[in-house]
Image (tube, rainbow, N blue to C red):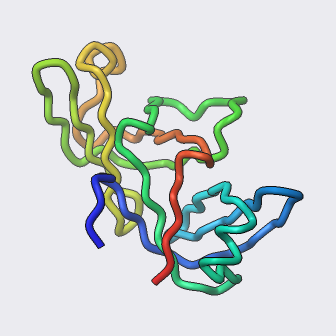
Amino acid sequence: MLTSARNTLYGTVDSVITGAVQSEVVLSIGSEQIVATLTNESVKRLEITIGSSAYALIKSSSIILAKSKPLRISARNVLRAVVTEVIPGAVNAEIKMSIGNSTLTAIITNDSCTELMIKKDDEIYAIFKASSVIIGML
């Protein structure tokens, strides 16, 4: 399967919490966890169960970066990463990060990259909402 999403992270389903309309699915990616919200219909159709192998798709433009861990935010996903590459463009910069054995890419404005002084080997936090995650099953 080919997608336009820059980030595909593979892991194992840790938990599924079913609500009235939506479910929360937690996927373990190495030592980190990714939280996704899906409709109950999607959970049933994909046959998502604890222990299943799955992957998370996250668009690079959905990721917000912070140099220090935010204290209180509504986004469910705050992943600690290390910057492996900064590629400035005409308007935006591409920030590549490692999270354990996985690579995560974010697209932010050049101004934000400059203001945050993001450089290779920086510890950084990748932040994104659970509703920005698409889950696929292996």
Relative to 42, is 5 on the left or the right? Answer: left
Q: Quadrant of residue 34?
A: bottom right
> Residue 122, how many percent across, how many down?
33, 38
Relative to 87, is 45 on the left or the right? Answer: right
- Vertical arrangement, residue 63 with respect to residue 57, above or below: above
> Residue 102, how many percent across, how many down?
35, 64
Q: Quadrant of residue 100?
A: bottom left
The quadrant the N terminus occupies is: bottom left
The quadrant the C terminus occupies is: bottom left
> Residue 76, how many percent across, how many down?
66, 45
Q: Residue at x 35, y 69 (%)?
A: 101
Of the pair 129 and 77, the residue shown nearer to us? 129
- Vertical arrangement, residue 35 with respect to residue 93, above or below: below
Q: Residue at x 19, y 43 (%)?
A: 85
Relative to 84, is 46 on the left or the right? Answer: right
Relative to 85, is 13 on the left or the right? Answer: right
